[in-house]
Image (cartoon, rainbow, N blue to C red):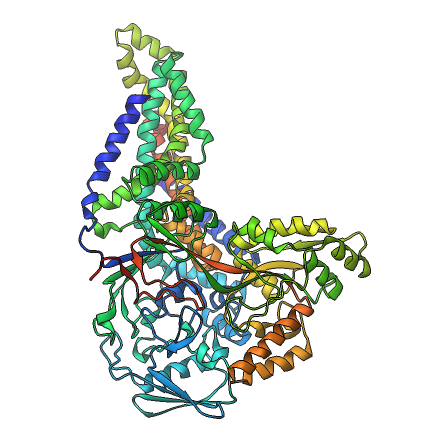
Amino acid sequence: MRLPLAMATIGLAALAGTAAPSLPAAAKDRVVVGMQAEPPVLDPTINAAAAIDSIVSGNIFESLTLIDDRGGVVPGLADSWTVSADGRVVTFRLPEKVTFHNGRALTSEDVRLAFARAMAPDSVNASKKIFQPIEAVETPDPRTVVVRLKQPTSIFLFSMAAGDAAITATETVEQNRTRPVGSGPFRFKEWVKGDRVVIERYPGHRHADRIRMREAVFKFIPDASAQVAALLAGDVDAFPVIGAPESLARFQRDPRFKVVIGTTEGEVILALNNARKPFDDIRVRRAVNHALDRKALVDGAMFGYGTPIGSHFPPHHPAYVDLTGRYPHDIARAKALLAEAGFPNGFETTVKPPPFTYARRGAEVIAAQLAQAGIKVRIEPIEWAQWLDIVYKQRNYDMTIVAHTSPYDMDNYVRGPNYYYGYRNQELDALMKRIDAEVDASRLHALYGDAQRMIAEDAVHGFLFQLAKTGVYAAGLRGYGQNEPIVQTELWQWSWAGQP
Amino acid sequence: MAFFLLRRFGTLIGTLLAASLVVFLVLEVLPGDPAQVMLGVDAEPSTVEALRRKLGLDRPPVERYLAWIAGLATGDLGISYTYSVPVSELIAERLVLTIPLALIAMAMTVAIALGLGLYAASHHGKPGDWGVMAFGQLGIAIPNFWFAILLILYFSVHLGWFSAGGFPGWSAGILPALQSLLLPAISLAIVQAAILARVTRSAVLEVLREDFVRTARAKGLSRRQALWRHVLRNALIPVVTIMGLQFANLLTGTIIIENVFYLPGVGRLVFQAISQRDLIVVKDVVVLIAALVVVVNFLVDVLYAVIDPRLRTQR
């Protein structure tokens, strides 16, 4: 047996050796970025998949504004903007030389048409609601866009950074699905479906001289252990969001890599069906919250990566209020509340976790935690398409675990009984209306604080933890962001150490 | 022979119709709305409705089934919901990976299995035979995805000879492309080879006991000559039967192996299509695989006739 194995090894080595010289030894100006999911199309304005934004937003396509690593709104395609005193008129100023990758100049008219497409009745833009406040778009000259709003809208400038609000060219709307044409620092090169998307530096970009990467490859690797192997084998230089938190300790010990832990906009909640017994009873919902041990959950399900939360708001935001102490882990109190609600011996229920690591692993830990308070949980795993249908649309569930990853998504709590939360609080509805229209930052933050408290007080869900952004990068890479305040992988600041 | 072919063609059509009906009905009752999957949780219900109309999902099921079958009959596989390109293009792009992968794996399977099986049978009861039997037992017991991970850890991560997965495309050259298919093909082949080696061994052993082998030996042929000239051919019928079944296994095995090595093949396509509810792609690929299996079984039947002249006259 030994000889054939040795021969096979030699044979493999010979075959492997032939391809080794294809690796370029010259100064690196190319980066391979690993991604868990492949985008279905490359046009962010017609499909909600986050995988689209993580490739094209800020690279191929530009939106009027950009979100920096700390969540602040900074100039994107628009150089600058002014907001009128009443907050209802926003005037964007476009830079002098902007061209689409097909060479045509981008003007204010392109902005108006892009918004018109997104707002049209037959539009399939997944974030149509961010355009709702717009009353009219005017273009007094080619470099000026005037947006009139129906009422002052606090998050308007933030939401204009979304991939859904990307400025696309009318003549390329059809081809953007597969061969996108934008105005960003990188232009599309090729898409080998199922394997990779390749983009290259756009020499006609107004900041082309500042872009260090000549080419970037996004490689799609869905399997968590394959992601680890690809990094270790050097096939991939970076994994901005790696699917295997248990592998991070190993990368931390390896000098070839740098592990970067940041924050995301993803609040992980144990969603309770407020419209269904027994979760229509606030005492039961509070009992669930007392029965949860968030620290143990983060340690057990996420290998310690994640920040416990007590309401539906990201801890890195300046308006965050720490409410994790509102329902301390207290089994006795949970049992007392259950007894008060008519369940002295607890009850049986189900949780339907979608196929994400945090949900599947979280469900097991949570089932064990709730069991201590007498709540017997049956775990019914379902896939994502089923989740969208059964849980989200039909609202046929008791409990589920899901991360809400959109920024400023507290407005979900005013979507009423037809939303899958099955929750309504008229006081909160009024408060959210005030938040929408408030343009003063400090007053706005105070109102956000009130909303967080109100949601926590009602114990709408079991609030669990904020998803961490767990990235692994080759040690020589520079310029990447730490956090993910909005889904994008902006490459224009990336470089290799020692690059001119 | 003409009647035989005609009957086979009838079987092909019947199987495909049955497969198409089953997959259509299963996907019909499977929860999950493609439009909702594409637009996510933030979309307004009216936007989802608009997309459903665009995709033609608002039409009644019978109408959709008939339209699909009529399309298939004329070679039109429809447009993918998620990728918005013709499904035929999508499948063609992926087949250039999956078919070579399955063929390489099949060739490896046959080479390893026949070699080991013949070796074991001709060394019946000796250490070499036990070695092969042990390998066979081990090969059958090992799941191919796990074996694939071992191969990656040793050859890609430890030795660094291969990339841990991915496919450069045939445009990058034959050699780099073949190189990226080698580890996946080995992981697919090893389990099948283990099974086939055991089948070959017992088939050969059985034939070795036949009277005509003794006669061959008696008229002066060496052991080796008798083995090659008389035993092998007679032992091939069960071996070829199993091979036909294994090809179907290899095709479905690529679904898992292509995911482990993140290869852009048909297996990965159908896996993604199921989770994204790209129903038209799922339906087309299932019918395609059913067609391939029927065709392979047909080839196996033809091979029987080549191997065993008696079967030719019977038909």
Q: Quadrant of residue B77?
A: bottom left
Please determine whether, in this image, residue A29 is positioned above or below residue A17: below
Across and down, in percent, residue A314 comes to 53, 67
Judge left or right: residue A422 versus residue B62: right
Judge left or right: residue B51 versus residue A393: left
Identity of the residue drawn at 31% across and 78% down: A169
Which quarter of the figure is the N terminus of chain A placed in? top left
Across and down, in percent, residue A240 comes to 39, 58
Please determine whether, in this image, residue B266 is positioned above or below residue B33: above
Across and down, in percent, residue B44 comes to 53, 74
Identity of the residue drawn at 28% across and 18% down: B228
Judge left or right: residue A3 versus residue A116: left
Residue B262 shows in this picture: yes
Identity of the residue drawn at 26% across and 51% down: B169
Across and down, in percent, residue B299 comes to 35, 38
Residue A281 shows in this picture: no
Please determine whether, in this image, residue A435 is positioned above or below residue A235: below
Which quarter of the figure is the C terminus of chain A placed in? bottom left
Identity of the residue drawn at 56% across and 58% down: A386
Q: How many marks?
A: 0
